[in-house]
Image: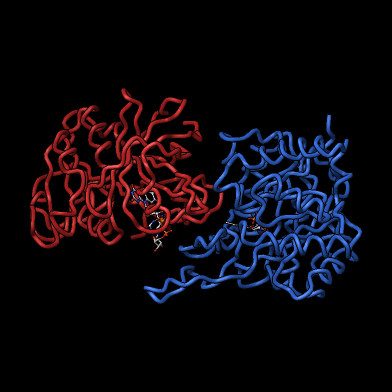
Chain colours: A blue, B red
Amino acid sequence: MVDLNVKIGELELKNPVMTASGTFGYGSEFADFIDLNRLGGFVVKGTTLHHREGNDYPRMAETPMGMLNAVGLQNKGVDYFINHIYPEIKDIDSQIIVNVSGASVADYVAVAEKIATLDKINAIEVNISCPNVKQGGMAFGTTTSGASEVTKAIRQVYPKTLIVKLSPNVTDITEIARAVESEGADSVSLINTLLGMAVDVERQRPILSTVTGGLSGPAVKPVAVRMVWQVSHAVKIPVIGLGGISCGADAMEFILAGASAIQVGTANFFNPRVTMEIIDYLADYCKRHGVCSINELIGALKV
Amino acid sequence: MKKQLIDFIITSTVMQTPSCGLIALKPINDTLPEIVPGQFVELSIDAVMLRRPISVCDVDYENNILFLLVRNAGKGTSRLLHLPVGSKVNIMLPLGNGFSTNGISFKPGVRTLLVGGGVGTAPMLYLGKKLKENGATVTFLTGAKSSAELLLVDAMKKVAPVAITTDDGSEGDKGFVVNSGIWNQPWDHVYCCGPSPMMKAVAALCKEKQVPCEVSLENMMACGLGACLCCVEKTVRGNVCVCSEGPVFDIKDLTW
Ligand SMILES: Cc1cc2nc3c(=O)[nH]c(=O)nc-3n(C[C@H](O)[C@H](O)[C@H](O)COP(=O)(O)OP(=O)(O)OC[C@H]3O[C@@H](n4cnc5c(N)ncnc54)[C@H](O)[C@@H]3O)c2cc1C
Ligand SMILES: Cc1cc2nc3c(=O)[nH]c(=O)nc-3n(C[C@H](O)[C@H](O)[C@H](O)COP(=O)(O)O)c2cc1C
Ligand code: FES
């Protein structure tokens, strides 16, 4: 038997495969296609202190091997999550991670405090990298001072595993990673979407209601792998890699480059069973390469 | 209704007009799941990354065949229409809520008008068959730019009477579907699918006549499962996903 267990801080995952926030709803949307209990973990939709309606339609555009989105953190707020969604999903035998967003440091702290009271949730992922909201979001993730400030404040109220999700829309992502590490983050996940734009040439208008949006999908994978490689050399905490993963070999690229776990986002849309295929691939890969534990392969890239 | 991923084989593609084809598909191993009229499917097409949503046009359970009416609108649909017979296509189905075809308001003889514009005529054929089965009186109304672009008229005629409008007057009443003489008759329930300006015009007319009306929306989709929140429409309940809470909406719920 191959051992696929990995650890992110105190958080134990039965395998390194998670789903990415905003691409997997609350899990149940995919229950007809996959066994949610087999997932290493799943990160639920970005959650804010108050209900948010999100941006106007149109919110998406397909681009070559990718897509732009401008959902804008539509969600019913943290209290709704706690009272109505959490009870429905808490017994799934997988790690549920709540993705936390806010427009101010106080918002982030308030959401983190509330989520900390939930027994079955052992980690939060702090989104300081959403390109689709006017205030906060990416603003915190693009300066070391902003990233430090949010991380420090949340660390004071959140005792369990604290993952900070980084924006790729910066000159040097390793600076931000080091800043959040020094404020006590247990892990960093990367990358969030790359800021992008698409134009409808006949109508001479932007396709998205917000003009710009976040690029995801296979098109961003090489950028994401590069950033995971750089960050895993810059920090000691475990790195969670994501961006364009759509098959087992893609996941393996991130693991070899230094990711202790991976997330799958956009690929769930075109292949709802992709996470199961990746888990099977990783087990088979370990066997083929004669390793007993996936941990032996994390950052095992030969350069 | 459990959603499934099923591999189908294209058994025929018959072009109805230069840009629209009726595609017949058969599951390779499985049998077709139960499908409600107005539900849609998401097809995986090799030319594009995301699946493409297409309404169910008709279902032949006896011969295990799914029919889709597809308009060439871009890369994905063009590739789909050109796939040779025998090609394998992975389809996720059934998706969305579908039209209401029974319930308290559906006493036998209920007078229903099924309005389709262009390729929006697609879901009306299967809907008409189901409504007739449930004892409703069915009339189709279909509109197109010209006689040559009318879709499914013969197939619909086998089910119920068909009223026609064309923009240029080359067949039926001249003008848009709302200009049809058929609106002078009393209707108990209207169903509508087509381009957004047409659906808005039909919705306005139904509001004026105080006739209940359901419309099927075609917002752009990424997941088709209610997971990504890309396909939202503004409703009286706020932004809701067209893929999971629609595509069919009672016009009372929309902010049009
Ligand atoms: C619930 C639902 C049911 C549908 N039923 C049918 C049907 O029965 N028959 C049919 O022919 N079409 C139907 N459509 C529309 C069809 O999905 C789009 O035409 C198709 O996705 C376009 O893909 P493409 O790759 O060919 O075009 P692309 O190359 O992606 O785009 C070409 C153009 O089409 C527009 N477009 C892209 N996606 C959509 C969309 N979802 N709706 C409208 N415009 C779009 C783009 O903005 C662009 O201008 C339905 C859509 C939905 C949401
Ligand atoms: C439709 C959509 C919604 C998203 N919503 C969120 C979100 O709420 N919070 C967040 O941290 N990331 C969000 N993301 C970013 C993804 O979690 C992920 O970082 C990104 O898409 C890259 O991974 P991928 O290429 O595998 O999709 C969203 C992405 C998409 C496509
Ligand atoms: S298309 Fe993803 S929620 Fe509707």
Q: Is residue A87 left or right of residue A3?
A: left
Residue appearing at x 64%, y 37% in the figure: A88
Pick the quarter of the image with the C terminus of chain A: bottom right
Where's residue B122, x and y in %?
Answer: 28, 45
Q: Quadrant of ligand 2?
A: bottom right
Q: Quadrant of residue A28?
A: top right
Asked if residue B223 can be seen in this view, the reply is yes
Query: Of residues A56 and B235, which is closer to you in this image?
Result: A56
Q: Is residue A145 left or right of residue B154?
A: right
Q: In the rendered view, would you say B239 is above or below B96?
A: below
Q: Quadrant of residue A29?
A: top right
Where's residue B7, x and y in %?
Answer: 47, 34
Where's residue A244, x and y in %?
Answer: 65, 55
Residue appearing at x 11%, y 39% in the figure: B161
Q: Is residue A65 left or right of residue A303?
A: left
Q: In the rendered view, would you say A233 is above or below A81?
A: below
